[in-house]
Image (cartoon, rainbow, N blue to C red):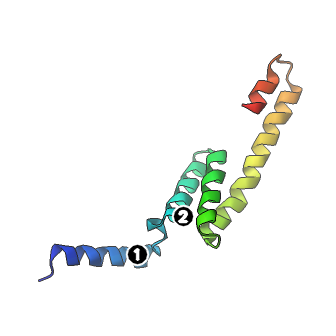
Amino acid sequence: MMSCLTKGACWVGLLCLMSGCASLTEYGKLQQRAQMNYSRGNLDAAVSDAAQSLRLNPTYERSILLIRTVFPNAVANHVDNIDAAKRSSDRFKWDKVVS
């Protein structure tokens, strides 16, 4: 009969094989957090998390693919905010851009 420790190790090993173990690494956790931020519309946080993931593992394909999608969207969002401020007659319109 297997001990609880041995069974636990078997489950961890099985989960690693199924998930590729990346989700257990720091860069994998950052990529997952970046994906979550992206799905919630938090583009700046998604870019930051994906970049941190790539600093830890520059060849991690999931983070590479994600940042290729998220970064252009984040830039476009900022450009849209700048354009809206330019069109605005609000006295403090630039405060929204720089904050």
From the viewer's perspective, is 76 left or right of 42? right
Kindly identify which numbered label has been placed on residue 1. Answer: none
Kindly identify which numbered label has been placed on residue 16. Answer: 1
Foreground residue among 9 and 83: 9
How far is disc 1 from disc 2 in space, using C-alphas?
15 Å
Residue 32 at x, y percent in the picture: 52, 59
Residue at 57% over, 49% down: 37
Label 1 vs 2, first from the N-terminus: 1
User: Closer to the observer: label 1 or label 2?
Assistant: 2
Taking 69 as reference, is 59 above or below it? below
Residue at 58% over, 65% down: 56
Residue 11 at x, y percent in the picture: 29, 74
Taking 96 as reference, is 65 above or below it? below
Q: Quadrant of residue 98?
A: top right
Q: Quadrant of the N terminus?
A: bottom left
Residue at 54% over, 52% down: 36
Q: Amino acid at mark 2?
A: Tyr
Residue 86 at x, y percent in the picture: 88, 29
Taking 31 as reference, is 36 above or below it? above
Residue at 88% over, 27% down: 87
What is the residue that sits farthest to the bottom in this orientation? Answer: 1
Q: Quadrant of residue 12?
A: bottom left
Circle 2 packing at 10 Å, graded few (<14), some (14-19), many (20+), is many
Circle 1 packing at 10 Å, graded few (<14), some (14-19), many (20+), is some
Q: Amino acid at mark 1?
A: Cys
Kindly identify which numbered label has been placed on residue 27. Answer: 2
From the viewer's perspective, is 83 left or right of 59? right
From the viewer's perspective, is 91 left or right of 20? right
